[in-house]
């Protein structure tokens, strides 16, 4: 009987986890293995492989003088967008909209969620109109009404444009997660705190933020990794320019591989991005002590 139960559990696990395991192997493990193989070849635009070599890795580790600048740009972009918008502004939006009546809060959340639902090209086109250096740009129209001369943000402050464009669309993800977490907090905790004389800021500090600690940790880790590998808005808005001022690591990989035809070197750079992503994920996982979230509860709730 015990053998039958054990075999039945093994079959259930295989049926439950099998499809996900197959998809993970096909769409993550196999591409990584292919990338590793290409990284140690001389594949170019003609897609031919004539020799296996370590030159691409050596070039990435010490021979590419532009890579250090790209890494600095990526760090600036990820840190600013993550801290200010994806986590900070998303949390602020969730706090403000949950404090409003339900219908009003839902309306404002829907408005902030619209950019995420719109095509990337449309969203980038709107931002191009906002920061256009001519008098017809939305920002310059507003400045002109105040008597201020037109400015060219895409040339003078391209990183600001990139952070703003990615930040406003990225904040909606954290807003949804945080709003759901805030609404799941038992209301009697807030009622008891108000009876004791707690104000709005005290409620946020001592009840709301501790209660949504795990959601904040998850959004921070997820969005940090997402920002490291995303570049579509940057590519559409600035194409990584002017020069390489807004070229992040993922865009640099794309340009080396698909624009310059250096497929082997692009694969080596992509492999480096995988290593960096895994390292960052492990560091953040340990920093936020996410293992505690997965531990079994010490008491059973019946």
Image (cartoon, grey):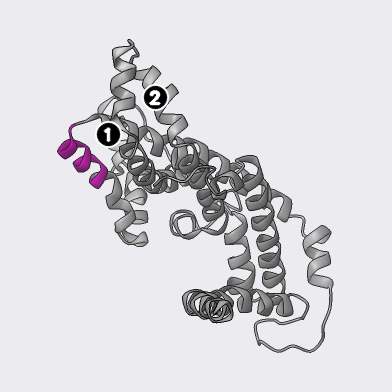
Instruction: Confirm whether residue 44 shows in the render.
Output: yes
Q: Position of residue 88 (x, y in %)?
A: 45, 35
Instruction: Using residue 253 as the reference point, say whether residue 165 is left or right of it.
Output: left
Q: Earlier in the sequence, mark 2 or mark 1?
A: 1
Q: Position of residue 30 (x, y in %)?
A: 62, 79
Pointer 2 residue? 204
Q: Is residue 100 magenta?
A: no
Q: Nearer the viewer, residue 63 or 57?
A: 57
Question: Where the N terminus falls, by quadrant?
Answer: bottom right
Q: Relative to 200, is 179 above or below?
A: below
Instruction: Using residue 103 as the reference point, say whether residue 18 is left or right of it.
Output: right
- SS class, disc 1: helix
- SS class, disc 2: helix
The span picked out in magenta is 101-110
Pointer 1 residue? 98
Q: Which mark is residue 165?
A: none
Q: Nearer the viewer, residue 105 or 13?
A: 13
Q: Relative to 120, is 55 above or below?
A: below
Q: Position of residue 185 (x, y in %)?
A: 34, 35
């Amino acid at each position: 009987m015990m053998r039958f139960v054990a075999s039945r559990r093994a079959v259930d696990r295989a049926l439950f986890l099998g499809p996900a395991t197959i998809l993970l192997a096909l769409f993550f493990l196999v591409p990584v293995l292919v990338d590793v193989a290409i990284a140690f070849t001389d594949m170019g635009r003609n897609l031919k492989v004539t020799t296996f070599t370590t030159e691409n890795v050596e070039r990435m580790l010490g021979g590419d003088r532009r890579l250090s600048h790209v890494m600095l740009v990526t760090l600036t972009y990820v840190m600013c967008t993550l801290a200010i918008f994806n986590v900070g502004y998303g949390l602020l939006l969730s706090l403000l909209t949950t404090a409003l009546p339900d219908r009003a809060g839902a309306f404002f959340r829907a408005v902030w969620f619209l950019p995420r639902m719109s095509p990337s090209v449309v969203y980038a086109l709107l931002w191009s109109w906002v920061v256009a250096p001519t008098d017809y740009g939305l920002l310059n129209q507003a400045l002109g009404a105040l008597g201020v001369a037109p400015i060219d943000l895409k040339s003078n402050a391209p990183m600001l444009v990139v952070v703003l464009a990615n930040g406003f669309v990225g904040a909606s993800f954290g807003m949804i997660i945080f709003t759901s977490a805030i609404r799941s907090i038992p209301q009697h905790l807030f009622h008891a705190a108000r009876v004791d004389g707690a104000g709005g800021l005290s409620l946020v500090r001592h009840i709301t933020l501790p209660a949504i600690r795990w959601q904040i940790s998850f959004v921070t880790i997820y969005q940090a990794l997402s920002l490291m590998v995303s570049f579509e808005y940057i590519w559409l808005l600035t194409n990584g320019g002017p020069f390489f001022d807004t070229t992040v690591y993922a865009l640099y990989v794309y340009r080396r591989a698909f624009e310059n035809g250096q497929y082997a070197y692009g694969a080596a750079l992509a492999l480096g991005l995988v290593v960096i992503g895994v390292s960052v994920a492990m560091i953040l996982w340990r920093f936020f002590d996410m293992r505690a979230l997965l531990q079994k509860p010490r008491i059973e709730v019946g």
